[in-house]
Image (cartoon, coloured by chain):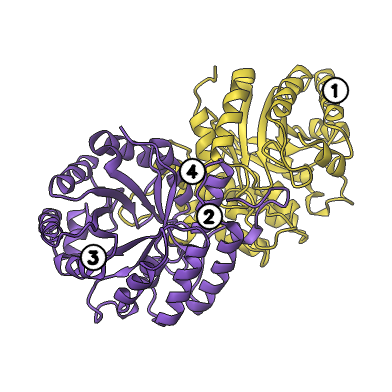
Chain colours: A purple, B yellow
Amino acid sequence: MSIPSPLIVREVGLRDGLQSITRVVPTADKLQWLQAAYGTGLREIEVGSFVPARLLPQLADTAELVAAALRLPGLITSVLVPNLKGAQAALDSGAHRMLLPLSASRAHSLANLRRRPDEVVAEVGRIRAARDAAGSRCLIEVGISTAFGCTIQGAVAEGEVLRLVQAVLDAGAEHVGLADTVGFANPLQVARLFERGLSIAGHRLNCGHFHDTRGLGLANVYAAWQAGVRRFDASMGGIGGCPHAPGASGNVATEDVAWLFAGMGVPTGLKFEALMALRGRVAGWVGGEPLHGAIWRAGLPRTLQEIE
Amino acid sequence: MSIPSPLIVREVGLRDGLQSITRVVPTADKLQWLQAAYGTGLREIEVGSFVPARLLPQLADTAELVAAALRLPGLITSVLVPNLKGAQAALDSGAHRMLLPLSASRAHSLANLRRRPDEVVAEVGRIRAARDAAGSRCLIEVGISTAFGCTIQGAVAEGEVLRLVQAVLDAGAEHVGLADTVGFANPLQVARLFERGLSIAGHRLNCGHFHDTRGLGLANVYAAWQAGVRRFDASMGGIGGCPHAPGASGNVATEDVAWLFAGMGVPTGLKFEALMALRGRVAGWVGGEPLHGAIWRAGLPRTLQEIE
């Protein structure tokens, strides 16, 4: 059912990465980061989150980042929104795409969002109504987290995840993705859940968001790709680690995902040398926060051409 | 064509790991290491290499390790042999299995083994004759390295790798494996080459040896497992890195492979807590050499049971 499409890597370091560290990176640095990320060939970037500045001062300048991103030709500008209020800010900003997180684990949803999953589904409906009333073309995506397991309740039933995929689409979301932000997923599980999800949602299920917490991030990306997924979240240097597991990896590293697909002959449009250069600058901007990922240590095989 | 079998992880840290570091670990420590590895549930261990002590003083005590390993009930004792002379020593030692490396890359073979690949194939024949003449039941396995690419010549033709798989079996090897010791392989390539190899060799092609140099080690293990491979080399703490790429990972880490298969519900017999305890001791024995791997940082999900 899925429509064949080129492979898209969405860079989430400016949101998922910076959200997880306490240091507030100055807006001027972020604007350079955004520009350099665009220069690596990335054509979808999550630039921030419309949450109250008192909760996440790191992301208080999201509107300014959106404005800058909208000036970059061909770039899809994505923002995270926690609720209708954030969605209104996203609509005002002119972002192309808003991502609403929904936790499939009831326990995690109550603890982190203070809402049951179905209350978030209802919020999707309100956001869709607001979007349509505003005459906006901002695309509504829901990211279903704890889709592969939860730090609080443990297992999450696949049937419940699939029910929520259908529910958010019914409520008005245009796209949906599945996320493992806690590093519980294994590739067999990823393949199975995405295959079942794609049979329900078709190409509207079109994002895999994997963390490398326990080393299986890239194996999970590969398994989702095998199942038909053609769009993945990643962050430069794998930033976005869990604050409760010091040293643990965060998102799959953009440069590693680029290497995975380059090796497989799947074009991503990403330029390896530019990714490596940006990685070095990101290390400076986040000031001592640990970076992750593998390919930067060994570099490309000397006998291979530049990937792109 | 492959015969279904339980999943086997062969621990290679005592050979591949120690071979790559200059420090000579005392025999007494290695004997403790061997005993503890057995205690984690490992039932196949490569304990050393019968190479001249002047070349690899780290492994000069291999015969002593073999003798100790043979006293552990149910353990398959494996040793590396570079040539007929090493094979004679392996036969004398009573090891259950000898592994002869063969580089599919002609350039790499000449540089590292000072022999063309077909000269190594001929050596397999001589080793088989010696084994049979000795009335030994020591199993002869050939590990085809640079099967997925080579640091010297770059690409290695799949047809040449497959030709060598057939050639070593014809020459008398009973088992054969494919190795990526340089971190060039990607999962699509791994799946394709193992599928083609299995169609030629059936269950006699039964080992995947992957390094995590560029982050794809576990994805490659998964891809080979999907293709039907049920036996993998790994090393505690991922030791065995390339001396030419400081900080680069080595073999896939035994504990990470255990987590991969545990998550997928594939029994390996490995006990996670025992693996973690051994990892800590290995760190001491190798004295400051960097360890690798992912699961040790985050640990098992708290909501999951002990894996086994």
Query: Marks 3 and 4: in contact by CB < 8 Å?
Result: no
- Label 2 crowd bin: few (<14), some (14–19), many (20+), radius 10 Å: many
Q: Amino acid at mark 3?
A: Val
User: Can you give x and y, in whole percent of width and height, for residue B125 in the image?
Assistant: 83, 21
Query: Marks 3 and 2: in contact by CB < 8 Å?
Result: no
- Residue at the disc numbered 3: A81
- Residue at the disc numbered 2: A270
Q: Nearer the viewer, mark 4 or mark 3?
A: 3
Query: Marks 1 and 2: in contact by CB < 8 Å?
Result: no
- Label 4 crowd bin: few (<14), some (14–19), many (20+), radius 10 Å: many
Image quadrant occupied by the N terminus of chain B:
top right
Query: Marks 1 and 3: in contact by CB < 8 Å?
Result: no
Q: Amino acid at mark 4?
A: Leu
Q: CA distance from mark 2 to mark 3?
A: 27 Å
Q: Considering the numbered disc 2 on the image, is that residue within a helix, a strand or a loop? A: loop
In the figure, residue A196 lies in which quadrant?
Answer: top left
Image quadrant occupied by the C terminus of chain B:
top left
Q: Are marks 4 and 3 on the same chain?
A: no
Q: CA distance from mark 3 to mark 1?
A: 71 Å
In this rendered view, identify the residue nearer to me: A6 or B276: A6
